[in-house]
Amino acid sequence: MTSSAPPSGPIRLRDYTPTTLATEPESGGADPFVAFLADTLWPELARRHRLRDDVRGIAGHSLGSLAVVHALFRRRPFFNRLLASAPSLWWDNRAVLCTAQNLQRTGLALPARLFLSAGEQDSLSMIGDLEQLEDQLHALPFPELEIISRRFPQRDHYNVLPEAFRTGLQALFG
């Protein structure tokens, strides 16, 4: 049996990456994706269900959490509860760290709660990039941004998901 569904790789690169790479021409669609979530999907969900407007969450893992981190570092972020499990901060030479740094210099307040995590057995580069982001955020804090960081023992990039999401959701909404 064959599937008519397109492979998820190109869609993931399109929706979850904040910048376009020459080697990945379909990449760089995180801004339209986040705008869709905030401007189209959220109002439709609010029309159908009773939602609290003061608590808006987004979560992701790996490339998905790159989009989560990018969603926070916009001039007017929509989401204020963000869960980033093993974020792929390496994308485009860590461009999201430069975006954060440029925003940090403005002194902009980010009234949000950010949960950052990874498995202790993830790759050295993933853990190193996450530590770099954490160090950067602590060195020049955004006013009103609460950062919660966790490392999960005996977990790698793949088997960290259940624990990261359970713990992160509890920390953000519990």
Image (spheres, rainbow, N blue to C red):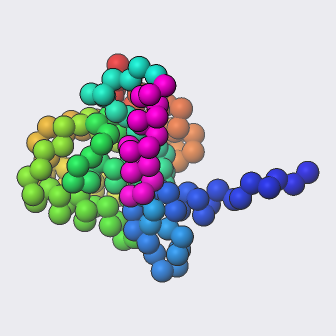
136 to 161, vertically: above or below: below
Tell me which segment is drawn in magenta: 31-48
Q: Position of residue 158 (x, y in %)?
A: 57, 45
Q: Nearer the viewer, residue 108 or 136?
A: 108
Number of numbered discs on residues: 0
Q: Position of residue 137 (x, y in %)?
A: 19, 50
Q: Is 46 in the magenta? A: yes
The residue at 32%/67% (across/down) is 95
Q: Where on the picture, by quarter, is residue 125?
A: bottom left
In the rendered view of the protein, which quadrant contains the C terminus? Answer: top left
Q: Nearer the viewer, residue 174 or 4?
A: 4
The residue at 52%/48% (across/down) is 157
Left-right relation of 34 to 27: left
The residue at 8%/52% (across/down) is 107
Give the main secondary structure, helix, strand or loop, of the magenta stretch.
Answer: helix
Left-right relation of 10 to 29: right
The residue at 57%/40% (across/down) is 159
Q: Nearer the viewer, residue 56 or 149?
A: 56
Q: Position of residue 99 (x, y in %)?
A: 25, 62
Left-right relation of 142 to 58: left
61 to 100, vertically: above or below: above
60 to 166, vertically: above or below: below
Q: Where on the picture, by quarter, is residue 146?
A: top left
